[in-house]
Image (cartoon, grey):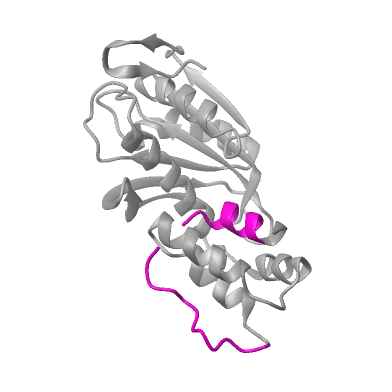
Amino acid sequence: MFVTSILAAGLHASGTALLQDDVTADPPLAEWLGAAVDLADPEARTAEARRLAALEGPTLEDWLAAAAELQPIDGGAAKPGRREFEVELWVSGEVERTTLTVVVPESYDPGVPAPLLVALRGAGGDGPSMVWPWAETAEELGAVLLAPTEVGPNVGFQANVRERESVVAAVRWARRHYPIDENRVWLTGYSRGAHLCWDLVLRHPDVFAAAVPCAGAPRFALAGGAANLR
């Protein structure tokens, strides 16, 4: 079923179902869709997406209309400038408390989807260390700049699932809090962040439209399975 594939792909994830068995003939699709999107566990989102897609009655047009009504949290209200957020992200089956540095451009308009530029730290660095190299470029492009300080070991490229999932989770957070243009999500990184940049864009070409890895090449290493070359 086409709607099923759209919802499953769009929501990604099993937990407590949001819907009751005695659903009405006129369900609040946008409300249900929003609640499903905001489930933390990816498996829960997938399960709820399948449940929603199995509803009899709603057409593809109904679901598209419901998706169009889905607005960023707090309506995407934000002021230009830099802020630090302490957030909880679902990473590899558990919640991680992470600091995200966000810079909103002067041209920001909550009614217009903006590009998202994600900047990944080098070994020994953090999110704020990635702001100064990219803030001016993000401003010129009218892009929201996202620089995560993820909680993994502050060393070099780890080439593991947790490392990748922490970035994808941060992108998901940004897309729920700002009106992001899903076709203009860009990725960059320095050194360790550049290796991770290669790894992410080659694994998630559906998420990232462009990448600018700096001082970090694709590589293939049998030791530890550090392969970000495809």
Residue depicted at x 67% and y 71%: 66
Confirm whether residue 79 shows in the render.
no
Q: On the rendered image, what quadrant is the N terminus found in?
A: bottom right
Confirm whether residue 21 shows in the render.
yes
Q: Could you say which quadrant of the image residue 208 lies in? A: top right
Magenta highlight on residue 21: yes
Residue 178 place in picture, x, y as percent: 55, 56
Magenta highlight on residue 96: no
Task: Tell me how many marks there are.
Answer: 0
Up the image or down, 50 lies above or below 180; here it is: below
Residue depicted at x 33% and y 47%: 91
Give, as a single range, the part of the protein colored magenta.
Answer: 4-25
Q: Could you say which quadrant of the image residue 160 lies in? A: top left
Residue closer to the observer: 109 or 224 = 224
Residue 170 place in picture, x, y as percent: 42, 46
Residue depicted at x 58% and y 70%: 52
